[in-house]
Amino acid sequence: MNEKNPIVFVVDDDSSVREAIRSLIRSVGWRVETFGSAQEFLSSRRPNGPGCLVLDVRLPGLSGLDLQGELAAAETQIPIIFITGHGDIPTTVRAMKAGAMEFLTKPFHDQELLNAIEQAIGRSAQRQAPGAKEYSFGEIVGESRALRSLLQQVEIVAATPATVLIQGETGTGKELVARAIHHLSLRRNGPFVQVNCAAIPLGLLESELFGHERGAFTGALAQKVGRFELAHQGTLFLDEVGDIPLELQPKLLRLLQEQEFERLGSTRTVRVDVRLVAATHQDLSQMIADKQFRSDLYFRLKVFPITVPPLRDRLEDLPPLVQHFVNRSTLRMNKRIETIPGEVLEALSRHSWPGNVRELQNFIERAVILSPGRTLRPPLHELRGMAETKDVAERVSGSATTLEEAEREHILEALRETNGLIGGPRGAAERLGVKRTTLLSKMDRLGIPRPARGAANHPSPPDHLLATSGSFAS
């Protein structure tokens, strides 16, 4: 994002929540103003420029929903992120239908809120740009032939109600493609609800998707509305759909076919109008062969398949991506980087980028932090390591008999270099540019033993498993 000095407004009557959110937002370099009521916010003088509103649903006097209506009546265009308690969910459904950008249920993770704010500020900046269209492709950056082909498919399918299956390696930007489909569709004014199926414990996934009634199971103290109901008249994005357990897949198939389901603990049928966009980095056809995924569900999801190209297949997009991530990082860290040396771009272009765009983003963020002046100065040893990584990948590509073997060998190499440490800023997941949970899933699939629980300093796998190195492809 190129916008300068974005501002985030926070409206919550709980002073401790306001202060916690204020500190979080300031920690990443954004300006923030807080208010204890909707009336206080409406009477304030708000500066021009990009920004967003983080809004509690339940407020004294005017509620969050009332404030949303007041802003709409005044034609004040500001992206709204609702924060809610469990009891506020039905009200939040109405808020999403009225145009709220996102909702988060308390307690939420800090990164969830920061991600939502970043998306909102980006949309606000696009609206204010001279000659801006109703929606651009946001953070999907580049002009390569591969990317133009992808965006053409997005524009074609967005205008239809078809179910979309987005396939691609980890870190390629599948969520951004899903958001683009939603915002270019006729459902753009409806909610966009996201669920990462790999991040939710299997025992809770059914309740998260379909909801439950009070008393449906131990701990179900109140009724919960599921994500499908929250996405009514909008789009539901099922990320990592390959991680949905087999026993839950028939219920998802029925919903896709009939647009109806029952909450856990209920016999009442709920009908919804939801457009489904799913994504996965896994080979679902192989999972079908392995009896891990239903073929009928696969074909119902694959009405319109889209494949997101890996970064190594569109390296001509690397310079604008680097500039984009430099702009984002300097904004968050209150730094100025004015020059990106040509030799830096040349070194980056020699890397195979196994973690794709997410790996590039992480690397640029580190480079911005470490650059002492206004010129981007990544650590030279990391650049040399990148060139060596690609050399290794090219050598292994001729010796590994399958892509799976190459992936396994590269993970083992990363584990060796980090002494078996998986998570954290110096772990193998960070080095590979993937999430810790994704790396653990890959290790299980490829037969790589996990470090023993409680082992000191997360010792590395046995030496005989770390004897080879190779390329990595999600």
Image (spheres, rainbow, N blue to C red):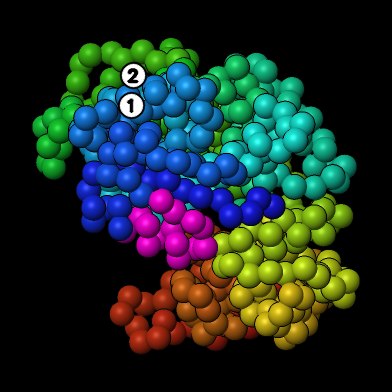
Q: Which mark is residue 261?
A: 2
Foreground pick, 16 / 150: 16
Q: Amino acid at mark 2?
A: Phe
Taking 205 as reference, is 170 left or right? right
Q: Earlier in the sequence, mark 1 or mark 2?
A: 1
Q: Position of residue 38 (x, y in %)?
A: 31, 35
From the image, tell me which residue sits under label 1. 65
Q: Position of residue 63 (x, y in %)?
A: 27, 29
Residue 11 drawn above or below residue 460: above
Asked whether the viewer can see residue 449, the reply is: no
Foreground pick, 212 / 43: 43
Q: Position of residue 276 (x, y in %)?
A: 52, 26
Residue visible at 67% across and 18% down in the picture: 159
Residue visible at 41% across and 81% down in the picture: 458
The span shown in magenta is 20-33
Element class at badge 2: strand
Foreground pick, 52 / 395: 52
Q: Position of residue 360 (x, y in %)?
A: 69, 63
207 within the magenta span:
no
